[in-house]
Image (tube, rainbow, N blue to C red):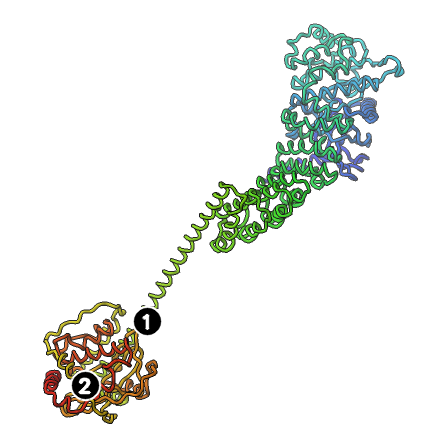
């Protein structure tokens, strides 16, 4: 890399030094900046051609420089001759003005080291293009090295030289005297220009007489730069010391031969023995046949043979050569017409430009870019010609690369984009640009698109011409993917909507809807839902074409994977808009079917999506409900386990206490526990305590409650069924009418209300007798969801007095039960609930006859099933029947209410004390029950 940089640095330094040394001190450098060395030309290729720029106008020029160091080897008088010859040629060229002659921009300037003058921009000399690279830089430009002349270039180039010679011979009365490839210059546009008038000869006769051209004898002692190139001189110039216009035509024939023969002349001349060489050449020319001209195209071969004829009178003149069929090529004629374009009027120009698109594909790209494009863009200053020129310019732009387009074409199109006058021409320009919009958006840089191209599209949408609006709407979808999203959203779409709403043309309105439908895929989903779909409801007309356009947009949005319409939009806006449109009277059967098909599809998706949503929501609710139930059951289970554990502790710690009366207080229980903790435990007590802990641990780890059908387990020992006996006794008791005795606080059944159904039956028993508990403890009560029994908190429904061995029940007078209120807990009941219960009576009650039921089983059963554990099946014992009777009456009260129920009438429960005492059957049954 370093070596390459050093090489590049040395090359640039050398070129800069060469240029500096070549033009240093020359007055040309005051007005022009001299650039790189690009070519060489003139007699002997003595002139170096540099690229230059005028300082004041930045106009591009070519700077011709003759370095006097090239002639240091000559004597002073020879140097002077060379300098005089060069000056004469440049001065003559400066005086002559013709399109076929090289145009001088700045006259010759001489300094101590060089001669210099400036001309129009130059590419190279014909000699350079044909492979003669003398006096060129060591690193030859690839543009020259790889340059290849096309047939149309050679044809038209030779035609241009012929036209230039015709001008010299006919108008100026001058013989050029040195027509060679070195003196034919190709300018930047590719045109062939004549220079090198060092040896020109003007007519000595007045203009009205036949021209006569004096000729100097060939002097071999003069420096080569003071003599014309003998390889292209006519024989008569050397052999007979005569020259005329036909001598230049011989030189033209030699140039034609060299052009088609890769730069090699037809004869090589020995400059040391010039006369002998020309004598031999003359003999060969007299016997010149077609076989010697095989490299020349057949259609011009005979004309070249005539040009190389020994006799000057036989040679065609320059004007005749311009009219030969060889130059009638369509490409050459087209180029020739461009060169004379300034002479034509607008009608002739318009006709020519209309036919040009047929010719352009037949021409090489370089020729088009170099020769035709500059001529076309120069016509943009004529507004009337722009509609005719613009299609050709855009056709050329299609063949150009993006870099060529940006460099050569886009700067010229800038004013055309903004042209609005005259109106007719402006409308034509809009149409042309719209047809080539994809080209413009593809090759134009983004900044220029925003600044020039898109404003023109917006102007077309707002144009008064319906044709332009229609064309613009039809073309926009073809290049929508090339427009940036902000411009489309903020500028293009609003103008399309305005065109649809404000136009009076049905075609424009329909095309607006079609255009929107085609560019939906380039838009954002929410922009379509929030901006495009509401716009459809604003369209006032109901023509079938408009309605189908609206339907098309809805369908495209609905079915597009990227877009889609939400079910809320479908239900709230789309379907309420589409359904009324579907029954418009103007629609035919097929159009109505299209509407219905789309509506059904929308309804189907709406149903599917919403059903799916509701199903998912239902599943979530069910899962949430399951979780809540599970949490509640776990919480109740933990509470039940804790409560049951505390009761078990009480059962085993409060042995000997009365469970039903609850005579022991909580403080007393705590004191007993503390006392037990203080005393040393026996082995049996420790074993008992370990079992209690194990049972409590099992209760804590049990599974959540699950409703299940439980079949009561038959007890191992069948007890006697006292149900029928007890029912008969109750019936007989209810038939008696007695007065209600006064209830005592110590002999009253206490009703403990709670949520659901809680009942506790307690009766005082003599301490000498066995403790009996019938019913449920408040702390071990059950809850039944679904019903509750309203109870007056101040009313005791059960009362009785006890005698030795027999329980007597009396019922107090019930107050009015006109109003029912939810169960409330009176202070006495709260106190009863807080009193610890003794479970020993329960153990003594059931004893070995009661089936073994664990607390775990009790907690997993339903409340009624749990109660059935305490009620033996029919035929087992009278106590079971009594319990069932209580349960049945409780459920009956819940179902029918307290009033009207004879069983729960307090008066029916009032009975004389002797009733139960005199009943031997009941006494025996109770003995069997307790005994």
Tag 2 residue: 735
Q: Residue at x 68, y 17 (%)?
A: 258
Q: Quadrant of the N terminus?
A: top right
Asked whether residue 830 is in view, the answer is yes
Counting from the top left corner in percent of width and height, residue 759 is at 25, 81
In this rendering, position of residue 878 left or right of residue 139: left
Q: Would you call the spot at circle 2 few (<14 residues within 10 Å), some (14-19), or many (20 or more)?
A: few
Return the residue nearer the eye: 259 or 27.
259
Q: Residue 778's spot in the image, x, y percent?
A: 26, 82
Residue where numbered disc 1 is placed? 632
Q: Estimate how packed mark 1 is, as few (under 14), some (14 to 19) or many (20 or more) residues with alpha carbons within 10 Å.
A: some
**In this view, 19 is above or below 741:** above
Please tell me whether residue 726 is drawn above or below residue 602 in the rendered image. Answer: below
Q: Secondary structure at mark 2?
A: loop
Q: Does residue 487 appear anywhere in the picture? A: no
Does residue 404 sit above or below 315 in this rendering?
A: below
Q: Position of residue 250 (x, y in %)?
A: 75, 13
């Amino acid at each position: 890399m370093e070596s390459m940089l050093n090489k590049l640095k040395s090359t640039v330094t050398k070129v800069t030094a060469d240029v500096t040394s070549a033009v240093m001190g020359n007055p040309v450098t005051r007005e022009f900046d001299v650039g790189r060395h690009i070519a060489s030309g003139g007699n002997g290729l003595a002139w170096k051609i540099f690229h230059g720029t005028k300082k004041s106008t930045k106009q591009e020029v070519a700077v011709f420089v003759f370095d006097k160091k090239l002639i240091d080897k000559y004597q002073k008088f020879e140097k002077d001759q060379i300098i005089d010859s060069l000056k004469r040629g440049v001065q003559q060229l400066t005086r002559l003005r013709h399109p076929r002659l090289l145009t001088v921009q700045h006259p010759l300037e001489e300094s101590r080291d060089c001669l210099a003058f400036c001309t129009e921009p130059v590419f190279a000399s014909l000699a350079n293009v044909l492979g003669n690279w003398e006096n060129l830089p060591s690193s030859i430009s690839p543009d020259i090295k790889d340059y290849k002349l096309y047939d149309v270039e050679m044809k038209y180039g030779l035609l241009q030289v012929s036209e230039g010679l015709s001008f010299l011979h006919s108008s100026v009365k001058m013989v050029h005297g040195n027509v060679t490839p070195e003196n034919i210059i190709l300018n930047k546009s590719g045109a062939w220009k004549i220079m090198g008038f060092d040896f020109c000869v003007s007519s000595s006769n007045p203009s009205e007489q036949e021209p006569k051209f004096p000729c100097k004898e060939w002097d071999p002692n003069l420096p080569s730069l003071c003599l014309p190139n003998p390889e292209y001189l006519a024989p008569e110039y050397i052999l007979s010391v005569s020259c005329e216009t036909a001598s230049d035509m011989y030189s033209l024939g030699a140039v034609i031969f060299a052009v088609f023969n890769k730069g090699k002349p037809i004869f090589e001349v020995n400059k040391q023995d010039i006369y002998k060489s020309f004598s031999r050449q003359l003999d060969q020319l007299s016997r010149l046949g077609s076989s010697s001209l095989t490299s020349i195209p057949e259609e011009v071969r005979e004309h070249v043979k005539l040009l190389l004829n020994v006799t000057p009178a036989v040679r065609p003149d320059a004007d005749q050569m311009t009219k030969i069929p060889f130059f009638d090529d369509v490409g050459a004629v087209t180029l020739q017409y461009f060169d004379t374009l300034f002479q034509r009027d607008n009608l002739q120009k318009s006709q020519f430009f209309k036919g040009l698109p047929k010719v352009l594909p037949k021409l090489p790209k370089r020729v088009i870019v170099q020769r035709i494009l500059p001529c076309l863009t120069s016509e943009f200053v004529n507004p009337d010609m722009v509609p005719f020129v613009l299609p050709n310019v855009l056709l050329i732009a299609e063949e150009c690369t993006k870099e060529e387009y940006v460099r050569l074409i886009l700067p010229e199109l800038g004013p055309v984009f903004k042209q609005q006058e005259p109106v007719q021409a402006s409308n034509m320009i809009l149409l042309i640009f719209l047809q080539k919009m994809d080209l413009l958006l593809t090759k134009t840089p983004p900044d220029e698109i925003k600044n020039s191209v898109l404003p023109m599209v917006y102007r077309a949408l707002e144009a008064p011409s319906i044709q332009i609006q229609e064309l613009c709407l039809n073309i926009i979808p073809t290049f929508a993917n090339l427009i940036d999203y902000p411009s489309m959203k903020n500028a293009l779409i609003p103008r399309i909507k305005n065109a649809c709403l404000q136009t009076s043309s049905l075609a424009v309105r329909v095309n607006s809807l079609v255009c929107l439908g085609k560019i939906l895929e380039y838009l954002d989903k929410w922009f379509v839902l929030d901006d495009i779909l509401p716009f459809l409801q604003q369209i006032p007309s109901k023509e079938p074409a408009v309605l189908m356009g609206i339907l098309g947009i809805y369908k495209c949005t609905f079915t597009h994977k990227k877009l889609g319409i939400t079910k809320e939009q479908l239900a709230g806006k789309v379907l309420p808009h589409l359904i009324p449109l579907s029954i418009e009277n103007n629609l035919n059967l097929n159009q109505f079917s299209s509407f219905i098909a789309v509506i059904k599809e929308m309804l189907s998706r709406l149903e599917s999506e919403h059903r799916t949503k509701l199903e998912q929501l239902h599943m979530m609710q069910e899962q949430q409900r399951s979780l809540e139930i599970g949490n509640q059951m776990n919480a109740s289970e933990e509470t039940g386990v804790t409560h049951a554990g505390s009761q078990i502790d009480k059962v085993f710690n409060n042995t000997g206490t009365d469970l039903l009366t609850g005579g022991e207080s909580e403080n007393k229980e705590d004191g007993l526990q503390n006392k037990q903790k203080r005393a040393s435990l026996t082995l049996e007590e420790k074993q008992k305590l370990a079992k209690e802990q194990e049972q409590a641990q099992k209760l804590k780890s049990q599974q959540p409650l699950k409703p299940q059908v439980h079949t009561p387990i038959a007890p191992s020992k069948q007890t006697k069924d006292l149900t029928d006996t007890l029912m008969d006794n109750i019936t007989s008791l209810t038939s008696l009418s007695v007065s209600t005795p006064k209830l005592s606080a110590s002999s009253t059944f206490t009703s403990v209300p709670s949520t659901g159904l809680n009942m506790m039956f307690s009766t005082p028993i003599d301490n000498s007798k066995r403790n009996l508990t019938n019913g449920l403890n408040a702390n071990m009560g059950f809850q039944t969801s679904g019903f509750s029994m309203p109870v007056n908190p101040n009313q005791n429904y059960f009362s009785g007095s006890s005698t030795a061995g027999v329980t007597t029940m009396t019922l107090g007078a019930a107050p009015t039960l006109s109003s029912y209120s939810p169960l409330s807990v009176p202070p006495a009941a709260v106190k009863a609930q807080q009193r610890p219960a003794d479970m020993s009576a329960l153990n003594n009650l059931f004893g070995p006859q009661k089936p073994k039921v664990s607390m775990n089983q009790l907690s997993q059963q339903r409340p009624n099933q749990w109660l059935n554990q305490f009620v033996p099946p029919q035929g087992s014992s009278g106590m079971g029947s009594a319990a069932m009777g209580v349960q049945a009456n409780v459920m009956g009260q819940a179902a029918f209410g307290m009033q009207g129920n004879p069983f729960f009438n307090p008066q029916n429960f009032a009975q004389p004390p002797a009733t139960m005492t005199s009943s031997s059957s009941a006494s025996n049954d109770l003995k069997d029950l307790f005994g």
